[in-house]
Image: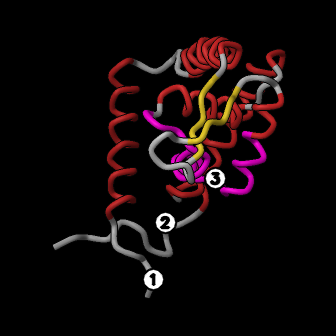
């Protein structure tokens, strides 16, 4: 038998997983925005750049899905990154309806500089955490992601 964890006596913002994840994400993105400021890159833009770098066949739709971002907003962000000379679009050879994304040399360099800054930022934020605590935290977040991806709807 599964025992429920939450009930009205313990479901408050400071104990709500959803609220805490959202606030932590917002605070983390703000820290990364600060770290990337002199590069002229926001944390969301860097996430797109690194997503293009790591994806086997990146498209605007795939990036929007991976980043849980609106497709229209993603297209506008790619337009801005393209205007900076960091991203290029190219029609897929196998299916002309698909537009693949790639980083330019300048985009790759910016993404890697920001990656180094992101590593430094997160290392500073986790300075008083043990490696075991960090590994456990990451494993728990990965488990939560798998649960959310495979869970049935919560609709009544």
Residue 20 in sight from this viewpoint: no
Q: Nearer the viewer, mark 3 or mark 1?
A: 3
Q: Are marks 2 and 1 in contact (CB under 8 Å)?
A: no
Q: Nearer the viewer, mark 2 or mark 1?
A: 1
Residue carrying label 3: 69
Residue found 40% across the figure and 76% down from its top: 153
* Chain part drawn in magenta: 56-78
**What's the mark number on residue 141?**
none
Q: In screen coordinates, is 84 left or right of 27?
A: right
Gap in Å between the C-alphas at discs 2 and 3? 31 Å
Q: How crowded is the residue under tag 3: few (<14 C-alpha within 10 Å), some, or many (20+)?
A: some
SS at mark 1?
loop
Q: Position of residue 154 (x, y in %)?
A: 42, 77
Residue carrying label 1: 155
Gap in Å between the C-alphas at discs 3 and 1? 22 Å
Q: Is residue 75 magenta?
A: yes
Q: Earlier in the sequence, mark 2 or mark 3?
A: 2
């Amino acid at each position: 038998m599964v025992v429920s964890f939450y009930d009205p006596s313990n479901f408050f913002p400071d104990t709500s997983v959803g609220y805490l994840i959202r606030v932590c994400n917002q605070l983390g993105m703000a820290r990364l925005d600060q770290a990337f400021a002199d590069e002229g890159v926001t944390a969301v833009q860097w996430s797109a750049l690194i997503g293009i770098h790591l994806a086997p066949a990146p498209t605007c739709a795939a990036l929007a899905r991976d980043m849980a971002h609106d497709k229209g907003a993603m297209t506008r962000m790619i337009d801005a990154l393209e205007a900076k000379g960091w991203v290029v679009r190219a029609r897929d050879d196998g299916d002309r309806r698909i537009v693949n994304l790639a980083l330019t040399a300048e985009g790759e360099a910016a993404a890697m500089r920001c990656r180094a800054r992101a590593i430094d930022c997160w290392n500073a934020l986790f300075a008083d955490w043990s490696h075991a605590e960090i590994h456990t935290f990451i494993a728990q977040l990965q488990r939560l992601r798998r649960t959310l991806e495979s869970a049935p709807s919560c609709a009544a």
